[in-house]
Image: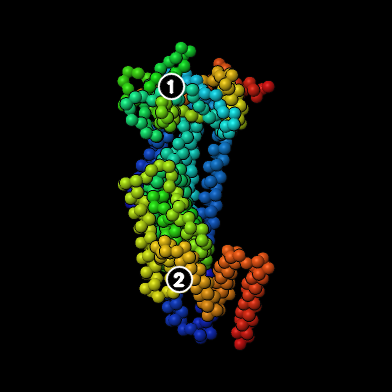
């Protein structure tokens, strides 16, 4: 439930009671049902943002100041100056834990500052002693040194930094699947924090940031670490990942209401549409078996197992979540979540004919977009109708470009699709106007 | 009570965070103090090689070692490169070993590439960091002293128990920092 709506309701309640529309008892029960609106949220959000940005700026400033006169310092001075930011960061974090353990903003800010300073110190020391650049090892050491902060200080930005770190670590081993696959256990370390953050209601902004970073990192991490020993598996793997995002986004972890607070649902849905759309093109299925990420390094035997096990697990989770929504007879959500299942089907039948997978996804996208339009009309929601029409238009236009039709007819098709958009919107707007007049 | 526990855990973490860079420092300081000094002659720079901007990228003449017979080697394997001194006083690698050598100076390095007769090594010193403004000047100077026709740059390295730490980079008989300072004055 929207916090703003509850606030509005609470403002109205006294008047409703005064006018005799509600009894005092009912009003009391409503208050009981919706609970107290926490007032701290706005100030603490501002504090978190200011605190964190301030921490970042101070940290970067310190490093810049140091780097400026670096050459003139003796090695001893450099070492002291390299360690100083780290010690300052630790001091600040300690002070917050000691004196302000309740302040989310202070904890988030100092934990972020300390996380960055750990990296800065190691990097500065590496420069002082000309330590050769093994980026992977450096990042991993840095990440291990900061990840406990996520739990000690209940801070989400260090968790985001950690996720970005292990993702780039995995990226530095993209040609070595046996190592890159460690991305999954490494990323799993922050799962408890992520779930905890999703359950929190008040500080949604950091949960949103963390969700976004999580989505980006898992998408990249999948590309870096999986599908290298089983060519063509990506057509099932990526839809499964986005289906998991999308379906998890519908779970009621907390009472989120506005759209930007639901990155899982929105990006998951968008990803599923983009993938399904991509699968309507012939080239995906034509080159599926000939093209693979396989690197020069031969991967065989046991080294293949982690890749295949994790791929399999992701597909199974997507299937289970899909089954769950189907069981609850939620048709709209199930339709989106069906992409992995269809991808498996298409993967299996592609041997018979390359037309079959194309047929599956063209029909699927047609059904999906038409169903959106119907739902939109039923609920009188212009947004849903337009999304459905946009999806349909993209499908139609793509098919027109695929086929050998003259430019004149292609141009006409564009005009017709555009007019369809306008006409539907005008009609609906009118219908709404009529309904409002009644 | 709960907060005390959290602070305790934090203090443990903080000490690990401090000990990590400190151990990096002490290990290198001990090599710089007690290690044996070697001069490694640098290899000519490919003129088309990109400038780095933050450090001088180093390559060495001696990073090619003849492939030892009867020793199975793989790419990125850790090996011990035994150090010998040539007539001009520069360090060279005489041979490779997969077990720790006794009584001779050596460096622990990684196999980068194996050809039929040679093994190319990834040495644990491949860059010399300079301040942001000095680095491009230093790279230019280093190139002038690392050409086919004029090659008088070398790296001073201290080695102890297979662990190598860079001491100074020399071009034309003086430290690169001095060469940069003179070049800036001109």
Q: Residue at x 61, y 82 (%)?
A: A431
Q: Nearer the viewer, mark 1 or mark 2?
A: 2
Between A131 and A347, which is closer to the camera in this rendering? A347
Q: Are marks 1 and 2 on the same chain?
A: no
Q: Is residue A309 left or right of residue A383?
A: left
Label 1: few (<14), some (14–19) or many (≥20) C-alpha neighbours in 10 Å: many
Q: How many marks?
A: 2
> For the C terminus of chain B, which image quadrant?
top right
- In the rendered view, would you say A125 is above or below A285? above
Q: Is residue A19 left or right of residue A293?
A: right
Between B126 and A438, which is closer to the camera in this rendering? B126
Q: Which percent across, then down, holds residue B15?
A: 38, 39
- The label number, if any, that marks residue A220 in the structure image: none
SS at mark 1? strand
* Chain designation of label 1: B
SS at mark 2? helix
Residue at image mark 1: B158
Place residue A25 in its image quadrant: bottom left
Q: Residue furthest bottom?
A: A438
* Chain designation of label 2: A
Label 2: few (<14), some (14–19) or many (≥20) C-alpha neighbours in 10 Å: some
Q: Which percent across, then down, holds residue A197?
A: 42, 58
Q: Residue furthest top?
A: B87
Residue at image mark 2: A335
Q: Is residue A396 visible?
A: yes
Q: Which percent across, then down, holds residue A228?
A: 41, 50
Q: How far apart are the alpha carbons under marks 1 and 2?
A: 66 Å
Q: Which percent across, then down, holds residue A345?
A: 40, 65
Q: Is residue A111 visible?
A: no
Q: Residue at x 54, y 56 (%)?
A: A46
Q: Residue at x 53, y 69 (%)?
A: A4
- In the rendered view, would you say B39 is above or below A131? above
């Amino acid at each position: 439930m929207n916090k703003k709506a509850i606030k509005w309701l609470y403002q109205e309640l006294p008047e409703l009671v005064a006018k005799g529309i509600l009894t005092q008892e009912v009003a009391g029960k409503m208050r009981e049902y919706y609970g107290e609106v926490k007032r701290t949220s706005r100030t603490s959000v501002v504090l978190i943002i200011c605190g964190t940005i301030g921490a970042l700026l101070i940290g970067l400033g310190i490093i810049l100041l140091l780097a400026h006169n670096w050459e003139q310092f003796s090695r001893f001075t450099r070492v002291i100056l390299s360690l100083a930011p780290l010690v300052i960061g630790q001091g600040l974090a300690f002070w917050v834990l000691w004196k302000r353990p309740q302040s989310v903003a202070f904890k988030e800010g100092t934990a972020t500052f300390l996380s960055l300073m750990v990296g800065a110190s190691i990097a500065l020391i590496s420069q002082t002693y000309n330590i050769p650049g093994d980026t992977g090892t450096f990042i991993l050491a840095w990440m291990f040194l900061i990840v406990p902060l996520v739990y000690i200080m209940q801070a989400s930005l260090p968790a985001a930094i950690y996720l970005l770190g292990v993702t780039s670590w995995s990226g530095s081993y993209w040609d070595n699947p046996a190592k890159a696959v460690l991305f999954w256990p490494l990323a799993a370390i922050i799962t408890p924090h992520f779930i905890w953050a999703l359950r929190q209601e008040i500080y949604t902004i950091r949960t949103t940031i963390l969700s976004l970073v999580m989505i980006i990192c898992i998408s990249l991490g999948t590309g870096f670490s999986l599908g290298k020993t089983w060519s063509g598996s990506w057509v099932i793997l990526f839809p499964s990942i986005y289906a998991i995002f999308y379906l998890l986004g519908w779970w009621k972890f907390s009472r989120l209401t506005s759209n930007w607070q639901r990155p899982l649902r929105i990006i998951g849905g968008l990803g599923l549409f983009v993938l399904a759309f991509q699968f309507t093109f012939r080239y995906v299925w034509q080159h599926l078996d000939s093209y693979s990420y396989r690197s020069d390094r031969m991967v065989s035997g046991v080294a293949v197992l982690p890749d295949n096990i994790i791929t399999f697990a992701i597909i199974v989770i997507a299937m289970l979540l899909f089954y769950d929504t189907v069981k609850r007879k939620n048709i709209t959500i199930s339709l989106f979540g069906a992409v992995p299942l269809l991808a498996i089907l298409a993967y299996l039948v592609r041997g018979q004919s390359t037309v079959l997978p194309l047929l599956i996804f063209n029909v699927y996208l047609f059904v999906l977009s038409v169903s959106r339009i119907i739902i939109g009309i039923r609920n009188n929601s212009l947004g849903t109708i337009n999304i459905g029409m946009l999806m349909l238009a993209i499908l139609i236009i793509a098919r027109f470009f695929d086929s050998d039709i003259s430019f004149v007819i292609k141009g006409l098709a564009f005009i017709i699709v555009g007019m369809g958009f306008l006409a539907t919107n005008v009609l609906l707007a009118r219908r709404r106007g009529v309904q409002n007049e009644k | 009570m709960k907060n005390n526990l959290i602070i305790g855990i934090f203090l443990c973490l903080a000490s690990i965070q401090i000990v990590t860079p400190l151990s990096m420092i002490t290990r290198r300081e001990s090599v710089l103090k007690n290690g044996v000094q070697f001069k490694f002659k640098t290899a000519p720079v490919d003129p088309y090689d990109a400038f780095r901007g933050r450090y001088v990228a180093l390559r060495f003449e001696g990073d090619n070692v003849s492939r030892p017979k009867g020793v199975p080697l793989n790419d990125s394997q850790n090996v011990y490169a035994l150090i010998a001194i040539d007539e001009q006083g520069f360090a060279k690698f005489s041979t490779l070993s997969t077990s720790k050598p006794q009584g001779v100076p050596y460096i622990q390095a990684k196999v980068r590439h194996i050809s039929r007769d040679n093994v190319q090594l990834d040495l644990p010193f491949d860059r010399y960091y300079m301040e942001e403004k000095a680095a491009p000047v230093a790279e230019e100077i280093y190139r002038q002293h690392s050409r086919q026709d004029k090659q008088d740059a070398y790296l001073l390295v201290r080695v102890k128990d297979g662990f190598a730490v860079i001491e100074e980079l020399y071009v034309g008989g003086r430290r690169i920092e001095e060469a940069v300072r003179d070049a800036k004055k001109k």
